[in-house]
Amino acid sequence: MSQHWEGGSAVLRIHNSLTRTKEEFQPLAPPRVTFYNCGPTVYDYFHIGNARNFVLADTIRRYLRFRGFEVRFVQNITDIDDKIIRRAQLERRSTAEIAETFTRAYFEHIQALGIEPADVHPRATEHIPQMVRFIQTLIEKGYAYRVGGDVYYRINRFPQYGKLSHKNIDQLRKGERISVDPRKEDPKDFDLWKAAKPGEPSWESPWGPGRPGWHVECSVMSSEHLGETIDIHSGGSDLVFPHHENELAQSEAATGKPFVRYWIHNAFLNIGGEKMSKSLGNFVTMDQVLAHYEPMVVRYFFLSAHYRSPMDYGPASLEEARRALNRLVDGVVTIGKVLDLVAPGETGGPAACAVEDTTALAAVRAQFIAHMDDDFNTPRALSVLFEAVGDLHEKRRQFEDPRHGPARRACARAAVEQIRELAGVLGLDLAYKSRAAELPAEPILATLDEALRRIHDDDHRELVDAMAGRMERIGFRIDATAVQPSWAYEGGARPENERARELLEAAIDARHLMRAARRFDLADAIRTGLSGLGIILEDYRAGTIWKKVA
């Protein structure tokens, strides 16, 4: 069961971007945790660089729950923005239509990646009145000023401006793209409210029709749903300045309270050695990625590096992630198949384990927690899972020997379940099936057909009859009287993969029949034929299992 937060022994430490140090995690009102993550601006499919942040936030949320915290997670949807307006004008559609199209796509893609929906997904357009009140508060406190129909934040009024990004306010103009508006008191002041322009959506306000600035949206939506001070705020490192810096300044100015206790930012995803971004035009959208790679592979790719380390995206990186994930899945599946061969239907759990096995189980869990407690070190946590699978394979001969009784096997099953559970904490589904693992029914049937023809030619009638009986049980009839005998399928419409699995089991049975008849050449021919299809057979004392490899 999960290790609960008790304010004591095991300490979760988080790298806080505000202090640039790892700090012990102490939420404001434990065990409750308030957590806000910057969501998508829905003018296009999000790119794989954005996906890194979304996977990180989901992983942190899952782990906090595993550790016994009660997490309230909010992720906004920015559904009004300059980019949405430009796309709507280009396509001659409404901004609402554009936003709805890509909001739906966003939810479809995060579901594929194993990302759970937030407790609340507030939309900017549903919080305009609250934003107007927030801006009015800043004006009344002297932190904002009106120029015509626009409202700007007065940066010089907030002496701590720059404390998150660690920038010197006097140096901000150098190297930064700051819009120059002669009406501003200071070029660095940023907009809180934008006066309406012809043809753009707008809302009424005390300063005339217009719409809120981007930074205001997150400040208001986080406070509306999580309170004035929140425990965790996460996002990509590209948001530290100006977005999060501006959020912090306006929120603390409005409330007089700390805005965020722990800021978490993930590093860039690079492509061709350069930061991936839509502004640079070197991005790959999520729909393009998922056309070539399974969602669990993409998720594993992100987990394979620490979130504060830059990553390089490319086909080689994704293929490496696929191979690694397949090794983990294959290791777990193999142990399960061997256990089912030795003692089909046998059950048991940790209570049936020997003391040393129980200790080993606890050690795996403790190591996993220790790495995740160290600023969510997912690559080290993954290494614990690989080591646990390796240890099971080293002990395999112990639990595949029936003489050792159920205790050793019960603990092996418990270990497999624990590996699955801990992988699930990272959002990895070890029931994942690689596209390469899909079984081809017709080529497997062709392998069986070749074996049939050869034993028919050799006049091994008993083998022909035995195979015919096995095949009839899965819907095939054999015409063994023909010069070239063949199978005819009469089992009705069934899924391809289901038929393929049954044919594969029949091929394994046929191979055993060949070996029992000392026709090792035919048995080897079946193994070789299946190997050519990427299907590997492994023989154990209790029987044979199969694996599909890429």
Image (cartoon, rainbow, N blue to C red):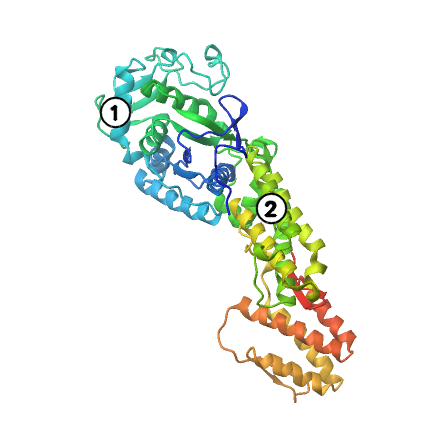
The local secondary structure at tag 1 comes to: helix
Horizontally, is 107 left or right of 200 in the view? Answer: right
- Within the image, what quadrant is residue 481 found in? bottom right
Residue beneath label 1, please? Answer: 133
What residue type is disc 1 on?
Answer: Arg
Residue 100: image location, x then y, percent: 34, 43
Which image quarter: residue 377?
Answer: top right
Q: Position of residue 108 (x, y in %)?
A: 42, 48
Looking at the image, which residue is at 32% across and 22% down? 192
Residue that appears at 59% across and 58% down? 352
Instruction: Select label 1 or label 2 by which is in front.
Output: 2
Residue 402 circle label = none
Q: Residue placed at 62% from the left, 50% from the top?
A: 358
Q: Residues within 10 Å of mark 2 (few under 14, many from 20)?
A: some
Q: Residues within 10 Å of mark 1 (few under 14, many from 20)?
A: some
Residue where numbered disc 2 is placed: 362
Q: Is residue 440 visible?
A: yes
Q: Quadrant of residue 534?
A: bottom right
Q: Position of residue 36 (x, y in %)?
A: 41, 33
Mark 1 or mark 2: name the one nearer the start of the chain. Answer: 1
